[in-house]
Structure formats: C-alpha cells, structure tokens
Image (spheres, rainbow, N blue to C red):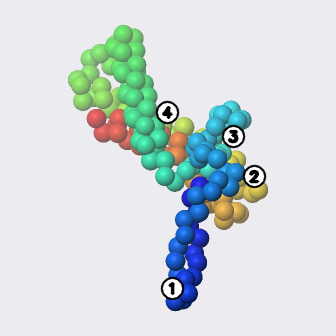
Amino acid sequence: MVRIIPDQDPSGDTIDHIDHTDHGEGPPKPIFEARDFDGLWGLAVTKYPADEVSHFFLLIVYMVAFYGAVNLGTHLTFILCNKRYQKLDNTKQGEYRSNVMSPIHAISSVIFASLSMFSVCEEGNVFTNETCFSTARYLHIWALVNTCGYFVQDTF
C-alpha cells in the first residue's frame, strides 16, 4: 500500500513524501472470498460494497431473465392446459399472465423485506439499530433487483 506522509521543509511549507514500503498488508483483497461467509445466508448478511455497481446490473439482468422465463413457462403451460386462456387474444393473455406473476413477485418481496428488516442485524433490527439501518447488505440488493426484474418484465 502506498502512503502519503506529510512533512515540513525548512521554509514551513508542507511536503508530501510517498512511502512505498510494504506494511505487511500485501495485495488488495477481493471483495469477498468463500471463507468470508457461510453459505448463501452468510453472503446475504454481508455488507454490500458501495463501489460494486457491475454486480448490481448483472443481478438485474438475471432477474429479468428469471421473470421472463417464468412468464414464458406460464404462457406455454396455459396454452397447453387452459382452454379459456387459449381463446383469449394476446392482450388478455398478457393480463392473465400478469395475474399469475404478480403474486409471485409480491410473496418474494414480502419475504425479502421481512428478512431485511428483522434478520440481517446481529443486534436488534433496522428500527432499533442506526448502523444496521444505514448499512446496505446483499439481501437488500437482492430485494431491489427482484422488484427491478419484475417491473422490467411487466413493462414488456
């Protein structure tokens, strides 16, 4: 790690010296390693790094693909098994599928929100612990991308 050490020259001006010595810190650590958390729940409660934007957008793409696949699967199942659905025009079929997709999103959002509020903090919950309230964790990001994925799929 490079450290900048302020120093003063004889005239009283501050001069910055760069310290290139190794202080035992070694190369920078990855954002997280397998040993840093215990399974999926361990990752869920891990603090989300503020500078990790590419991971966020990748998760949104995955959730759009997930909700698109569920929408397509629902459509194919209804085409094969539901006579009333087969008689509907495309607009009505889309509304019918939305009535199936909406509860899937609602139930998963309630689960994410409940876990985010009451289970991610070691001490208390988000209502009683200011640090917990202001710290984004992976579970919070997953809840957000769940809704983003649903909204994008529902728009199209």
In the rendered structure, which amino acid carries the disc numbered 3?
Asp
**Residue 97 coordinates in the image, percent (x, y):** 37, 28
**Residue with the mark numbered 4:** 104
**Residue 109 coordinates in the image, percent (x, y):** 53, 42
**Residue with the mark numbered 3:** 36
Mark with earlier residue (3, 4)? 3
Mark 3 vs mark 2, CA separation in Å: 16 Å
In the rendered structure, which amino acid carries the disc numbered 2?
Glu
Q: In this view, does 48 lie to the left or right of 35?
A: left
Q: Do the residues labelled 3 and 1 touch (CB within 8 Å)?
A: no
With respect to residue 70, does 143 lie above or below? below
Question: From where the camera sits, is residue 147 visible?
Answer: no
SS of the residue under disc 3? helix
Badge 2: few (under 14), some or many (20 or more) residues near its Cα, within 10 Å? Answer: few
With respect to residue 122, does 34 lie above or below? above
In the rendered structure, which amino acid carries the disc numbered 1?
Asp
Mark with earlier residue (4, 1)? 1
**Residue lying at 44% horizontally and 34% vertically, measured from the top left:** 63
**Residue lying at 69% horizontally and 39% vertically, measured from the top left:** 37
In the rendered structure, which amino acid carries the disc numbered 4?
Ile
- Of tags 4 and 2, the one toward the viewer is 2
**Residue 102 coordinates in the image, percent (x, y):** 44, 36
**Residue with the mark numbered 1:** 13
SS of the residue under disc 2? loop
Mark 3 vs mark 4, CA separation in Å: 32 Å
**Residue lying at 40% horizontally and 19% vertically, measured from the top left:** 73
Mark with earlier residue (3, 1)? 1
The disc label shown at residue 122, or none? 2
Question: From where the camera sits, is residue 36 visible?
Answer: yes
Mark with earlier residue (3, 2)? 3
Mark with earlier residue (1, 2)? 1
With respect to residue 83, does 2 lie above or below? below
